[in-house]
Amino acid sequence: MSRWERLAGFAVVIAAWLALAWIGVAVYSPPAPRAADVPDNEFSAGRARVILEGLVGEGIPHPTRSPQNTIVRERILGYFRALGYEPQVQVTHSLPPRFITVSRPVVWNVVVRRRGRQPGPAIMLVGHYDSVDRGPGASDDGVGVAAILEIARMFQVLPPPRNDVIFLLTDGEEDGLVGAQGFVREHPWAKDVKVAINLEARGTSGASLMFETSDADAWLISFFARHVSRPATSSLFAEFYKVFRLGDTDFTVFKAHGMEGYNFAFVRYVKNYHTKNDDFAHADPGSLQHHGDNAWQLLTALADFDLDRRTPGKAIYTDVLGQFVVRWPASINFGLAGTSLAAGLAACVIARRRGLFLRFKWRIFLAVPLPLLAGALLVWYVGLQVRGGWIDNPLPALAAYWCLALLVVFGSCRYTPLGRTDMWSAWTGVWLFWNALGLATAWYLPGASYLFLLPGAIAVSTALLAAVLPQRISPRGLLAACCLGPIAAGVLWLPMQVLLYDGIGFMLTPVYPLSAGLVTMTALPLLSGGATSPQARTSEAGSVQ
Ligand SMILES: [Zn+2]
């Protein structure tokens, strides 16, 4: 393979990465809101916006036990009654009765039940209607409440489903999940609930991300994959949510009570979260549409599902560019990572025996992390200057991180054994390193392991094929195979940058240069040099006929 062919491959990879970054911004933006005049059985953000304006349009904060809280609750009760439901108000406390003290605040949950065709377990859709006292809570969690009221309307025009459906609008969430605790502790319907869907917000825009599930989530993820049309989810979100302790929601209480389910939130423009800017004008209609679509698609499917068919087991999962969800059992995750690494080593041994490596030295494995560390250190230092929370437009900063990482990784690799070796040796070094990281994350941070495991396995499969069948693959086919790993890495890592920024901002700046360094290094083999001796040069030209 000539130097020019490898450079063409490199150009294809860079073009694919640029396209993926652009696609990532597009697919993880909220969908277009549907107008108020779409058919009755479609979720319409246009209609739900009218409800939202009716609830919180004045922009007055309504924390629990405030006069405005009572007004908002009465409006919610009015909506349910107008739809033909018989809503209950559950008066409950933050602490069990045995802890009777002066600080035992009372909160008021709104609870509605729609009976299904047969008695049995129920599905519950939850949002909280209280706000903090600093802001009117239009997105947190007025959008969730408005979505639930629009869904309650849609349910009334359908024939009764198989299972009961409970709508729970909790009070006192911002006071420490008081309403949710009162519901699970005291309400007689709580024991019927098998699956809860919680709608939340930590910002005023962005896609509705499914960021948390209950522990045995394999069946939930498979259900989600089949029924949600615009999935935005990954087991990485749950890991980040846990590691960064991004706060609790009512879902924490339901999980502790043994319910299974899904937790959704949109998290863009976190600077508006819990401020006076969390008002009707800032609430993104697209986020409302996405929340509503997700909840409606899952709720209608779950309402007709035989809940006794739930299966145990945990999953590793991710959506791919918002189109579909890839998933596998967590129980085989470590085995998969080990197999991929072993297959990579086997490919390396076979390729070496067949003379595909021109200048292979074991020390290139030691050299692989060097450009990565150099890039990370420099960009980390630069990152210290913009350390902090969230800025208005992060894209230039994120792009700058990537450009810097690209320059440092490609610039410094020339001075390491990695930059002076041949393409196949560099390729093996880079991808065995990725597969080793896949194995390490499968052990320590399983929810994040797919980020290494999927590109690593794809690259290793193509390497194995190339090592076993070097005579039958054309040089162009070999080049295409060589580009597959970097493109697969780009598919998973590039769109994630924007979502990560929405979630954690610049709280942990090294995440961005490390991601950038890891992904850009996968293209290094395409830049690696050829042979030095005439004999080796001939063998390089002849090795891929
Ligand atoms: Zn909230």
Image (tube, helix red, strand yellow):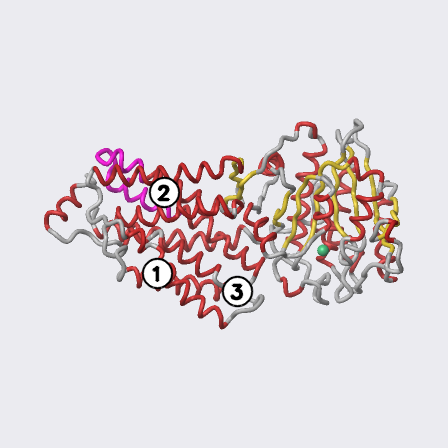
Rendered residue at 58%/54% (across/down) = 243
- Numbered badge on residue 87: none
Q: Which residue is situated farthest in the left direction here?
A: 534
The magenta span reads 463-487
Quadrant containing the C terminus in the rendered view: top left
Magenta stretch: dominant secondary structure? helix
| Residue that mark 1 sits on | 409
Residue 391 placement: quadrant: bottom right
Question: The disc labelled 3 sits on which kind of residue?
Answer: Pro
Question: The disc labelled 1 sits on which kind of residue?
Answer: Val
Rendered residue at 26%/50% (across/down) = 6
| Residue that mark 2 sits on | 459
Question: The disc labelled 2 sits on which kind of residue?
Answer: Ala
Q: Is residue 280 above or below residue 207?
A: below
Marks 3/1 in contact by CB < 8 Å: the verdict is no
Q: CA distance from mark 1 to mark 2?
A: 20 Å
Work out whether mark 1 precedes mark 2 in sequence or the reverse, and give the earlier one: 1
- Numbered badge on residue 394: 3
Coordinates of residue 527 in the picture (x, y in percent): 27, 54
